[in-house]
Image (cartoon, helix red, strand yellow):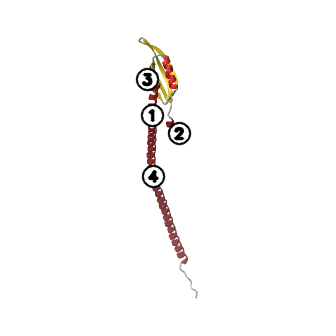
Amino acid sequence: MPSINLLPWREEERRKRQRDFGVATAGAVVAAVAGVVATIFVYSQMISGQEARNARLTAEIVELEKSIEEIDGLERQKERLLARMEIIEELQKSRPEIVHLFDELVQQLPEGVYLTGMKQTGSRVEIRGVAQSSTRVSALMRQIDSSEWLTDPEVERVETTQAGASRQSEFVVYLKQVRSDSDMEEEEAE
């Protein structure tokens, strides 16, 4: 005889499917929440790692800026020292020139001419003095023109004044100092 199942198997099957569906839905929700949490965790780790690298780069930039400032300070100090060294070298080179200038002035100064002042700017020399007459000033200029250390004499003024019973000429003469050949050769070698 055929057996007939009268139990409500369809309802049981339906409940089982609903339970399985609920479990699957809860599992999917838990998996989705876990995925979102894991993604947030991974991104926060990446962000904190990048922030740490940025902080290290910022610290290194600060250190490099300090080093650059120190280097700039040293460069400025080096330039000042080099400028001082150049000045000292120029002074060392010009030491014999002043000796030649004074020696040559003494040799070229004619009798009856007295110097009252002298000023040098570069190679140009201003001579102030008193002469017994204006012809003595002319003699001074001729002797300066024939000198090997002095050249290009120019008279700015000659004034005749009365000093007691005698007359005298006050004068201002400009001339140029010639540099020695050894000084010129040293400059060309540099």
Residue behind mark 4: 60
- Of the residues shown, which amino acid type is indicated by label 4? Glu
**Which one is nearer the viewer's eye here, 121 or 145?**
145
Residue behind mark 3: 117
Between the C-alphas of marks 2 and 1, the distance is 18 Å
List x then y, in percent, for residue 178.
51, 31
Residue behind mark 1: 96
Q: Nearer the viewer, mark 1 or mark 4?
A: 1
Q: Earlier in the sequence, mark 2 or mark 4?
A: 4
- Of the residues shown, which amino acid type is indicated by label 3? Gly
Crowd around label 3: few <14 · some 14–19 · many ≥20 (10 Å): few
Q: Secondary structure at mark 2?
A: helix
Please determine whether, in this image, residue 17 is positioned above or below residue 102: below
Q: Earlier in the sequence, mark 3 or mark 1?
A: 1
- Of the residues shown, which amino acid type is indicated by label 1? Pro
Q: Nearer the viewer, mark 2 or mark 4?
A: 2
Between the C-alphas of marks 2 and 4, the distance is 48 Å
Residue behind mark 2: 188
**Which one is nearer the viewer's eye here, 20 or 50?**
50
